[in-house]
Image: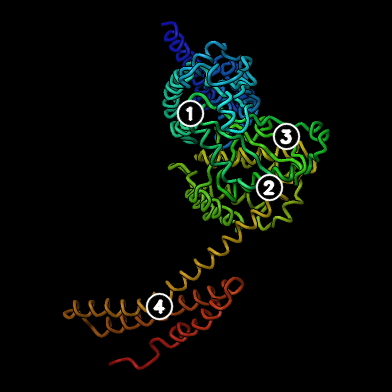
């Protein structure tokens, strides 16, 4: 009963906090502006947002469980939250006091089906790390398992006892809060709270399923099998369940330990370059990437008598991202639209990626995007590398304010890409203050644009074929239409009407010829750099519709 009382108290406390903050928000953001005091509310907004984030920070640390994950999730939502909140929550660490070892032992033995002393030759009672959802202990495999695996030192992650019940309670409370927020217009016109919660809930439930993490580790390892730059811990499946995960112990030098790297004879700047290459290979090459590459999740492991003399070892595969074909295509179209400074095309590509909410005013969005991206429009990657980083930061702040003023939100996969790239840039800058992110991304951006060039050739060819087909089909359709008109208008036909129909027919035929000529000529010119033979053929064949446009209807007319 104590546990039930505790979960009810937890539920009520979350709702009480949310109601208090919502009442304050309604007062300042809705009521005061209606009373003509909007300027007063505006002046204190930044300070209020900071205080709100600080109060939530305190609540999350006190409650632990899923609330710390909520804070970390919100800190990444630069698309819907102001910087005063995201910057405050960015420092929220998932470090909490460890659970009592007898409780950890009981849970592990229940899931493994054997006593710990039988499953492991040794098990360190003091955790190597403790987080809100689970904690990790170093251990040594039993002799038989060690013989099968070829090693005996492992790390065992064990879920916190009762964490599933806590997660369920927290999600239920957040569902209630999301319902309230959806009825607050100043929130609902910018973001869909229920959709946001669904994304967070799906990610959180995956994180407490260690079989999901184990599968992620194996998939990641398979993608980099044979790559001497990357290592991944092995999963000991015989000692792994949904609540217990056993991995080979791969502890080494933390990637941000610059002094430790130098002491081992490893150049931090070289580590930065390789780390960036590996991360962008995941994003743009494999399409499956580590979405939480903070320094605690990557080791640099020295390798004796090998080339290279070290490798990057990734751990913690609970948060993985995937660049789906749809997302990849959407990002490609987004990139092309930005390069062309095409506001309408940009909005269309954003819709394809799934960012826009149904209530979006696309005209306003087109103007906003055109204004923002015009600053960097037309620049190649070589020029972008020379742009002062402070200008990029200013652009980011400006872009962020526009994003938060409009009714759209970024899909989870898209946010994970941003999170991964942001953490990558931060780690690399720590290792090498002169690190330039453009040097790392340029090969992959070039590949993306080259792929798009190939797609453009195919699209242009399809368009040309469509135009040729239209050229041959439309005159017949017009003849058929005019025949039907003549047949149905016998009783009212007049010479004047006949002449007008004849003139309209000639104009339509010439217009069609001109449009087809222009389309085929331009298509041929565009195709010349990438597919010269096809481009030349289209340019030559365009003479046919040109002649048709010039000569259609010039012959003698029937009486």
Q: Secondary structure at mark 3?
A: loop
* Secondary structure of residue under mark 1: loop
* Left or right: residue 456 compared with residue 179: right
Read off the residue under disc 1: 209
Callout 2 touching callout 1 (CB < 8 Å): no
C-alpha gap between disc 2 and disc 4:
50 Å
* Mark before the other along the chain sequence, 4 or 3: 3
* Disc 3 to disc 1, C-alpha distance: 27 Å
- Counting residues from the N terminus, which is met first, the one under dot 2 or under dot 1? 1
State the SS at label 2: helix
Q: How far apart are labels 2 and 1 at the CA level?
A: 30 Å
Q: Is residue 370 above or below residue 240?
A: below
* Residue at mark 2: 277
Q: Quadrant of the C terminus?
A: bottom left
Task: Tell me what residue is drawn at x 67 percent, y 50 percent.
Answer: 441
Q: Residue at x 39, y 80 (%)?
A: 507
The label shown at residue 255 is: 3
Q: Toward which corner of the image does residue 146 lie, by quadrant?
A: top right
Q: Residues within 10 Å of mark 2 (few under 14, many from 20)?
A: some
Q: Are marks 2 and 4 in contact (CB under 8 Å)?
A: no
């Amino acid at each position: 009963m104590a546990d039930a009382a505790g979960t009810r108290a937890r539920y009520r406390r979350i709702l009480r906090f949310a109601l208090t903050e919502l009442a304050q928000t309604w007062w300042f953001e809705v009521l005061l502006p209606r009373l003509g005091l909007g300027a007063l509310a505006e002046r204190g907004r930044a300070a209020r947002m900071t205080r709100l984030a600080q109060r939530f920070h305190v609540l999350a640390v006190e409650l632990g469980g899923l609330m710390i994950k909520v804070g970390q999730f919100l800190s990444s939502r630069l698309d819907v939250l102001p910087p005063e909140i995201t910057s405050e929550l960015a420092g929220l660490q998932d470090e909490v006091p460890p659970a009592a070892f007898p409780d950890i032992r009981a849970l592990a033995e229940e899931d493994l089906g054997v006593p710990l002393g039988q499953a492991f030759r040794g098990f360190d009672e003091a955790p190597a790390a403790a987080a809100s959802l689970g904690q990790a202990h170093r251990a040594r495999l039993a002799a038989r398992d060690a013989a099968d695996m070829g090693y005996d030192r492992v790390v065992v992650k064990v879920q916190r006892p009762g964490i599933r019940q806590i997660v369920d309670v927290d999600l239920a409370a957040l569902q209630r809060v999301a319902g309230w927020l959806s009825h607050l217009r100043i929130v609902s016109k910018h973001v869909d709270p229920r959709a946001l919660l669904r994304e967070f809930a799906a990610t959180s439930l995956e994180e407490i399923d260690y079989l999901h993490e184990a599968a992620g580790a194996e998939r990641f390892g398979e993608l980099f099998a044979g790559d001497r730059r990357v290592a991944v811990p092995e999963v000991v499946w015989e000692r792994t369940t949904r609540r217990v995960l056993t991995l080979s112990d791969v502890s080494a030098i933390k990637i941000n330990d610059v002094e430790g790297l130098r002491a081992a004879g490893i150049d931090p700047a070289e580590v930065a370059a390789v780390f960036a290459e590996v991360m962008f290979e995941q994003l743009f090459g494999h399409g499956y990437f580590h979405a939480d590459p903070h320094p605690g999740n990557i080791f640099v492991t020295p390798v004796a008598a090998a080339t290279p003399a070290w490798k990057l070892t990734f751990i913690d595969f609970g948060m993985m991202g995937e660049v789906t074909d749809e997302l990849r295509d959407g990002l490609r179209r987004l990139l092309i639209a930005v390069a062309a400074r095409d506001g309408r095309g940009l909005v269309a590509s954003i819709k394809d990626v799934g960012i826009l909410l149904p209530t979006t005013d696309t005209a306003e969005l087109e103007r906003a995007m055109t204004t923002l991206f015009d600053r960097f429009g037309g620049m190649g990657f070589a020029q972008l590398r020379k742009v002062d980083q402070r200008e990029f930061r200013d652009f980011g702040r400006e872009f962020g304010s526009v994003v938060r003023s409009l009714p759209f939100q970024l899909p989870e996969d898209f946010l994970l890409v941003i999170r991964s790239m942001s953490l990558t840039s931060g780690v690399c800058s720590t290792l090498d203050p002169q690190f330039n992110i453009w040097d790392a991304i340029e090969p992959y951006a070039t590949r993306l644009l080259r792929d798009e060039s190939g797609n453009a050739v195919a699209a242009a060819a399809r368009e040309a074929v469509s135009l040729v087909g239209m050229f041959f089909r439309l005159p017949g359709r017009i003849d058929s239409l005019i025949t039907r008109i003549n047949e149905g208008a016998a009783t009212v036909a007049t010479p004047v009407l006949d002449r007008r129909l004849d003139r309209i027919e000639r104009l339509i035929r010439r217009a069609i010829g001109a449009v087809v000529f222009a389309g085929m000529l331009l298509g041929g010119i565009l195709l010349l750099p990438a597919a010269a033979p096809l481009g030349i053929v289209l340019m030559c064949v365009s003479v046919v519709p040109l002649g048709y446009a010039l000569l259609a209807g010039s012959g003698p007319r029937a009486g």
